[in-house]
Amino acid sequence: MGNCWVLAFLLPVIATEAAVIVGGGVGIGVGGGIGGGGGVWIGGGINTPSTPTASRAYTALQAWKSVITDDPLGVTKSWVGPNVCSYKGVFCSDSRDFMGNPAGEVVAAIDLNHANLQGILVKELSLLTDLSIFHLNSNRFSGSVPLSFRELSSLTELDLSNNHFSGAFPATVVYIPNLVYLDLRFNSFSGPIPDDLFDKKLDAIFLNNNLFDGELPQNLGNSPASVINLANNRFTGTIPFSLGYMGIKEILFLNNQLTGCIPQGVGMWADLQVLDVSSNSLMGHLPDSLSCLGAIEVLNVAHNKLSGELPDLVCSLRRLLNLTVAANFFSGLSQDCDNLFFRNVGFDFSMNCIPGKEMQRPEPDCSAVPGGGLSCLRIPSARPFVCGTLLGAQITTTP
C-alpha cells in the first residue's frame, strides 16, 4: 500500500516561512506548527484594505472571528487589522487580472488544522472567492455548512473532518464547481447521501465515521474518485452493481449494515489496491471476478455471512499482502490458500466452518449456513474463469 492520498497544489507565492500541507491532518502555523503565521501582505494599507478583494477577505474573516466562541491556542489573536495575510492560518498568493497583469495578493488557503477552535461557519466566508484550500481538521466547529459555500468557485479542497458538524449531508458542497477533495469524516452528519455527489469530478471522498444511513446511490460507480471511504456509518441495502465500472484504488464499506452479495462488478476494478467490506451482513459466495484484481494488496471480507469454499482464484492473487476472511461460514480452503503462509501473506481464516482447521466455529453454528437460498450472480463453471468485461448485468469473457 503506502499510497496515502495526497493532492499537491502549487500556489503562485506562499510566504517562505510557511508551507501549505495538503490532504488533511497537519496544522500549519497553529499551536506551534510549521511557521509562525500566514503569508506576506504586499501593498496593503495601514488602516484599510488596499483592494476590493482585500476588503471582502477582511469582512469574511472578521465575521467568522466574531462567532468563534473558544480559542484556547490564541490563534485568532493575530486576526487584527486589514492585513489579512498576516493572520495566523491564512495564506496568500499573488493574483493576476484577465490581462495577466499583477492584481495584488489574495487569500488562497486557510489551514487551521488542530487549532481546537469552537464556533460555527458563516455565510460571509463565501466572499473568499480565490480560496482554493480550506482545512479545519480537528476543531470543535458545529452546525452546518452555509449554502453560500457554493459560491467558492476556486475551492478545490474542503476538509471539515473531526469536528462537531451535524444535520443532513451538506448538499451545498455538490455545487462547489472545482472541488476535487472532500473530507467530512468524524462528524455527526446523518441521513442519506445525495446521488449528485458521485457525478462530481472528485478524486477523494471521505464520509466515514458519521451517522449516514439509507441505501448507497446506484450511480456510485459514476464517480472518478480514486479513494472512497464510507466506513462506520449506517448504510443499508446492497453494494451497487454499478461499482464494476470504477477505476478506484481504495474503497471501504466496513462496519455498515449492507446485505446481499458482493457483486461480480468488483472484477472491473483493475487498479484496486484496498477493498474492505468487513463487518456487514453480506452473504453468498465470493465472486470469481475477484481474481481479476491484479493490483489488490488488502482484501478484507471478515465478519459477514459469506459461505462456500475459498477458491484458488482469490488466493492466487500475486500482490496480496493481507487476506482476511475471519468470522464467516466458509467451508473449505483451496491449495493456493494453504500456500499463502509460505508467501508471507497475512491470512486470517479463523471462526469459519473449515474441517481440520483450528479456531473454527462449533459444529452447531455450521449446520445452517446463512443465506443458503440467496441467488448471487455467478460465472458459469463450464470452463475456467477468464477476466472479461461486464455489460449491464451480464458477464462476457474473452478467450
Image (cartoon, helix red, strand yellow):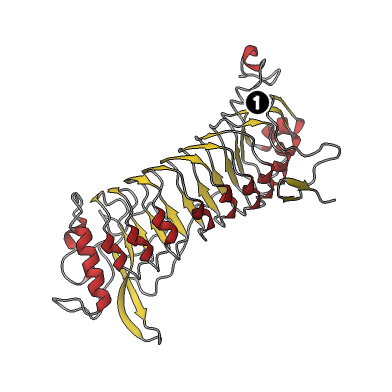
Residue found at x 39% / y 57%: 172
Q: Residue at x 45, y 44 (%)?
A: 192
Estimate the x, y position of residue 41 in percent, counting from the top left. 25, 75
Vertical arrangement, residue 244 with respect to residue 280, above or below: below
- Residue that appears at 23% across and 81% down: 43
List x then y, in percent, for residue 207: 45, 46
Q: Quarter of the image holding residue 282? A: top right
Amino acid beneath label 1: Gly
Residue 69 in sight in this render: yes
Position of 397 relative to 315 (above/below):
below
Q: Is mark 1 on a helix, strand or loop?
A: loop
Location of residue 320 in the rendering, given as x and y in whole percent from the top left corner: 65, 42
Q: Nearer the viewer, residue 294 or 382?
A: 382
Examine the rendered structure and indicate whether residue 344 appears above or below residue 69. Answer: above
Q: Which residue lies furthest to the top in this view?
A: 364
Left or right relative to 133: residue 119: left
Percent x, y of residue 74: 18, 54
Question: Is residue 337 rendered to the left or right of residue 49?
Answer: right
Q: Count the marks: how many? A: 1
Q: Nearer the viewer, residue 146 or 208?
A: 146
Q: Residues within 10 Å of mark 1 (few under 14, many from 20)?
A: some
| Residue 17 seen in the current view | no
Q: Name the residue under label 1.
A: 371
